[in-house]
Image: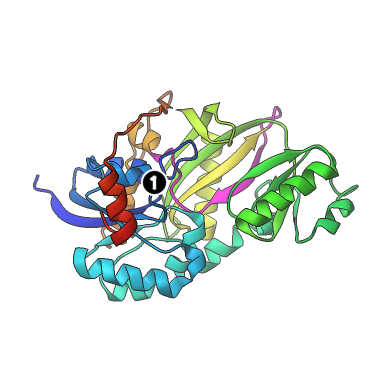
């Protein structure tokens, strides 16, 4: 079968010990049965490893940080698109999603398709809104509340007992055993991600995750559950195994059906010893371990591209349980002139 040539722009090229989803998404698209893909990398920093992985990324452009404002980002994308004629854009960082969601029509007008959650879907699953989310969609969630100042730390008890979790608005979570540790984590997270900081009840159990793709109409295109088998000091999966877990799948399809979720997502769950599942977080995009789902039989990035292009996509009906992934580090040798070129021209 002759493949259709398309150009896909992908962010999240930071394939480090805190990996972005970009390179796994690109690997999945390279294995597509339907598309011959040209990959345009979108990099925020000039040391993101994916920039220099020329076998995966055809050309990279530096883009301004989301904190610079949507207008600068959109102007840069319009320039890139004038050269590359991008068909589909897959953003992979939480912090950039707001800009792309609110400007999806503007992107569409210049020929760039996306397949992202609606603004309502994106906002209501924020960590600060999780208690209301649980009530609305009949999902168990840990008790949590946002705080905006250090003084609020000393009002947490008796509402919370220690240990508890201190979470950043977009990323990062720390266990705290006393108010002093909460204050320490509060300052670190505020400087990195801003307010609010989320205080969450600590649920004892096993962390499990589900990657899923919703079609925006309430249908689940694919879903694969996973348990982390090796976790880094940053809490990131360095190894994992697919699970045969009907309850995790039922919970996922229920959330997608009720919310009519549009795009990729990751559910972070805690499974207790009593076999109860608590939803602790919803990441509104494809997670970095997506290639495990591909290896288990569900090429979700390929399906997302099809949806973005308005194609009909049949839901996946199965996956292989007991499939494992194991990450490893690899030293790339890069010429200094490539680094200099990206730093000075913003392109490589």
Relative image position of residue 147 (x, y in whole percent): 76, 58
Return the residue nearer the eye: 47 or 2: 47
Mark 1 packing: few (<14 Cα in 10 Å), some, or many (20+)? some
Residue drawn at x 9%, y 44% as measured from the top left:
1
Residue 283 covered by magenta stretch: yes
Relative image position of residue 136 (x, y in whole percent): 66, 59
Question: Where, by quadrant of the figure, is residue 163 drawn?
Answer: top right
Would you say residue 305 is visible in this rendering?
no
| 66 up-or-down from 278: above or below | below
Question: Where, by quadrant of the figure, is residue 111 drawn?
Answer: bottom left
| 24 up-or-down from 96: above or below | above
| 153 up-or-down from 236: above or below | below
Return the residue nearer the eye: 191 or 89: 191
Relative image position of residue 215 (x, y in whole percent): 39, 57
Q: Secondary structure at mark 1?
A: loop
Return the residue nearer the eye: 30 or 53: 53
Horizontally, is 60 left or right of 254 in the view?
A: left
Would you say residue 201 is visible in this rendering?
yes
**Number of marks in the rendered image:** 1
Horizontally, is 309 left or right of 74 in the view?
A: left
Residue 39 covered by magenta stretch: no
Q: Which residues are magenta?
A: 272-290
Q: State the scheme by which the image is colored.
A: rainbow
Going by the picture, which residue comes out furthest to the right? 158
Return the residue nearer the eye: 198 or 331: 331
Q: Which residue is mark 1?
A: 48
Relative image position of residue 123 (x, y in whole percent): 58, 64
Residue drawn at x 42%, y 66% as measured from the top left:
100
């Amino acid at each position: 079968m002759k493949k259709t040539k398309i150009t896909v722009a992908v962010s999240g090229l930071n394939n480090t010990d805190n990996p972005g989803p970009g390179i796994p998404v690109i690997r999945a698209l390279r294995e597509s049965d339907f598309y011959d893909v040209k990959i345009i990398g979108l990099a925020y920093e000039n040391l993101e490893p994916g920039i220099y992985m020329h076998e995966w990324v055809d050309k990279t452009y530096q883009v301004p940080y989301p904190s610079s404002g949507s207008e600068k980002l959109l102007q840069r994308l319009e320039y890139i698109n004038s050269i590359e004629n991008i068909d589909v854009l897959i953003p992979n960082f939480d912090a950039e999603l707001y800009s792309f969601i609110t400007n999806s029509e503007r992107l569409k007008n210049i020929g760039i398709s996306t397949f992202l959650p609606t603004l309502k879907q994106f906002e209501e699953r924020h960590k600060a809104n999780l208690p209301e989310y649980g009530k609305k969609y009949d999902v168990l969630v840990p008790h949590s509340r946002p705080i905006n100042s250090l003084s609020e730390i000393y009002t947490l008890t008796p509402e919370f007992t220690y240990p508890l979790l201190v979470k950043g608005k977009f990323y990062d979570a720390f266990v705290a055993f006393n108010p002093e540790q909460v204050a320490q984590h509060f300052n670190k997270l505020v400087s990195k991600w801003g307010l609010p900081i989320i205080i969450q009840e600590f649920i004892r159990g096993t962390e499990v995750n589900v990657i899923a793709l919703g079609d925006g109409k309430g249908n689940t295109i694919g879903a694969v559950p996973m348990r982390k088998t090796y976790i880094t000091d940053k809490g990131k999966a360095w190894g994992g195994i697919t699970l045969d877990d009907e309850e995790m799948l039922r919970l996922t399809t229920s959330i997608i059906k009720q919310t009519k979720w549009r795009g990729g997502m990751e559910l972070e769950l805690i499974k207790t010893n009593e076999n109860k599942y608590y939803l602790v977080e919803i990441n509104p995009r494809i997670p970095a371990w997506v290639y495990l789902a591909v290896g288990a039989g569900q090429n979700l990035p390929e399906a997302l591209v099809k949806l973005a292009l308005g194609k009909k996509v049949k839901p996946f009906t199965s996956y292989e349980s007991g499939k494992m992934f194991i990450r490893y580090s690899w030293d790339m040798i890069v010429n200094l002139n490539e680094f200099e070129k990206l730093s000075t021209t913003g392109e490589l």
